[in-house]
Amino acid sequence: MKKYRSYRLSLGWQILIGLILGIVLGVIFYENKMAITAMQNIGNMFISLIQMIVLPIVVSCLTVGIANMGDIHKLGRIGGKTIIYFEVMTTIAIALGLLIGNIFHPGSFIDIHQLHSSDISQYVSSAKSAKDSGIWATLLGIIPTNFFKSLGEGDMMPVIFFSVFFGLGTAAIGKQGQVIIDFLDAVSQVMFRVTNWVMHTAPIGVCALIGVTIAQMGISALAPLGYFILLAYGTMALFIVVFMGIVARMFGFRLKDLLFVIKDEAVLAFSTASSEATLPRLIDKMDKFGVSQGIVSFVIPTGYTFNLDGSAIYQSLAALFLAQAYHIDLSLGQQITLLVVLMITSKGMAGVPGASFVVLLATVSTIGVPMSGLTFIAGIDRLVDMGRTAVNVVGNSLATVVIGRSEHEFSEEKSQNYLAELHAAKAK
């Protein structure tokens, strides 16, 4: 009997097909309100499914990981390393965006008054509330007065804060805490199984999300800002290949291997422009890749708030782009001030919806750019958001391996076995 090989598309290819179909549907249904509403709701349903599973995975994995770690001094050391690493990489990303903006001058080729403006009222209100809250309110907001309220609102940092202390408390009571560890370990396994089911709907969700973006905006709206979009993507690619590549080499592994492991998640992040969509699978994959569970479950969720390299590149490049478009010549001192302001505001507003755009709103006034100028790039924000989200995901994966290796909690054998398993699956 003749045997036939069965071909099955990987999740990455399914998502890419969904992306292409979404672009086609967006062009076909341009400004069709009924189709836009349908695609918007389908896309929102997919994002809601992801949000449904994110926090249970974070709570269960982080609590178990910290409980197994069981040492508050070790946790403090890991936490300190993680925050310093995040700050250094984010600063490099902001500086790179400013450097590229100064070299290529994307705003000098634009007549700002000929661009189509978009409504940014939702971002303005978010920026004002974030500005009014200040750094102290942000720090106070990390400590949950009601853990279940934070859980219900999907507020990541208070949930992480509680889970860390709950894990330490679980470790402190010894054998009695084993019941909690076993229970939460089972919860995490269940949620990873649910994640696999939810991921089957990813191509449909991606198709709807990109479709509604193109249908609302139209392809023609991209043409005047095409140079800026290409420059933003080129800068992000440069940051991954050069700077992330150097960091990987410094810590004794190849960035190429990491990118191979997370390629499906990077495509998913790019397609949905949602970091949350990749978080459950990223935690699972980094554990399989050889990083200890405690470090994975601490670094990745924290990175989603503090390590947004793609967003940092976009914010600095966009700020300089708008300054150039309005013929505002920024001195070196003003650009250094902009770098410092972006370093602070990007950390304080990371949890705000449309955070990158909100950060821009809060900072452009410091360099003399009118707030109305942001209406001209609001239309392409979603398109650039896809790229910066993918960079954020790669950056957080890299951070996990870096911290794991620096703590000697990275299994080379487990890593090589997992890579071999993935290559074998690809060959089939």
Image (cartoon, helix red, strand yellow):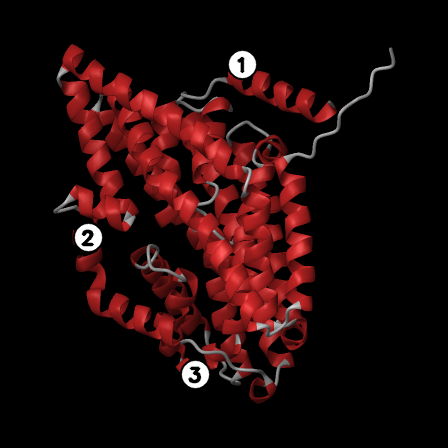
The answer for how far apart the CA atoms under marks 2 and 1 are is 41 Å
Residue 132: x %, y % from top left: 21, 70
The answer for how far apart the CA atoms under marks 2 and 3 are is 30 Å
Q: Name the N-terminal-most of marks 2 and 1.
A: 2
Q: Nearer the viewer, residue 161 or 366?
A: 161
Q: Secondary structure at mark 3?
A: helix
Residue 22: x %, y % from top left: 64, 57
**Which-is-in-front pick, marks 1 and 3?**
3
Q: Quadrant of residue 148?
A: top left
**Which-is-in-front pick, marks 2 and 1?**
2
Residue 413: numbered disc = 1
The correct choice, above or below, for 139 with respect to 403 in the image is below
| Residue contact at pointers 2 and 3, CB within 8 angstroms | no
Residue 120: numbered disc = none
Give the residue pinned by disc 2. Answer: 141
Query: Mark 1 is on which residue type?
Result: Glu
